Amino acid sequence: MTEFSFDCTGIAAQQYSAAPALDILLRISETTGARIDAVALRCQVRIEPTRRRYGRDEAARLYDLFGDAARWPDTLKPLQVATLTAVVPGFRGATDTVLPLPCNYDLDVACAKYFHALDDGEIPLLLLFSGTVFRTDTAAGQDGRIQVEQVPWSKECAYRLPVKIWREAIDRHFPAGGWIRAGRETLDALQRFKSAQALTTWDATLEALLRRAGERADDRA
């Protein structure tokens, strides 16, 4: 039987991707000395939100996800980021591979909302591995037959991703900005308001609406 260990050696923002993405740099070690022909690898990426502290402003932005901070002992649960797959070429001993991780920037998605809420520090990630291992059994009497094994579900590793790395990936495509999704009817209404007010950008349109909402709130007060 083979025996594997997994280590995340770093995470970097992709430089030439069509959309925001990170590269997870992964080292895979096989400790019995067996020759591995290939690994069909699966990696589940999770956020472990209990493993860091949060400032007051961060806690306010996380309200939609976890509720009031007084309830966090019950509500601060792991968040799923993605499940990644890769085919790792043959090796003996250890090998390095890269897992591309798309960065979801839709603020209706829980993990993107979490990332966006953080000012600085690190994002505690947990990488959980599974998959299928292919190797040629060269032991006496085996005639070089292909052996198929499973990567145990118990294999995992942790990594603390600096928030600035995630922001770098997002800012390559949306510098100093973000992205929100709206329904077609809402977009049509915003477009009509934007045209009627002769506003040139969506930022200016939203600012005008917020200003009106603030003025009405002041009038009611």
Image (cartoon, rainbow, N blue to C red):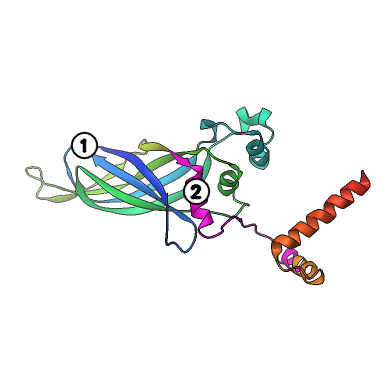
Q: Quadrant of the C terminus?
A: top right
Label 1 to label 2, Cα distance in Å?
33 Å
Q: Quadrant of the N terminus?
A: top left
| Residue 8 seen from this side | yes
Name the residue furthest right.
220
The local secondary structure at tag 1 comes to loop
User: Disc 2 designates what residue?
Assistant: 166
Residue 207: horizontal and vertical position, in percent? 76, 57
User: Disc 1 designates what residue?
Assistant: 31
Q: Report the label total.
A: 2
Image position of 152 with respect to 196: above or below: above
Amino acid type at mark 2:
Trp
Q: Earlier in the sequence, mark 1 or mark 2?
A: 1
Residue density around tag 1, few if under 14, some if 14–19, many if 20 or more, within 10 Å = few
Residue 75: horizontal and vertical position, in percent? 62, 33
Q: Which residues are magenta?
A: 160-188
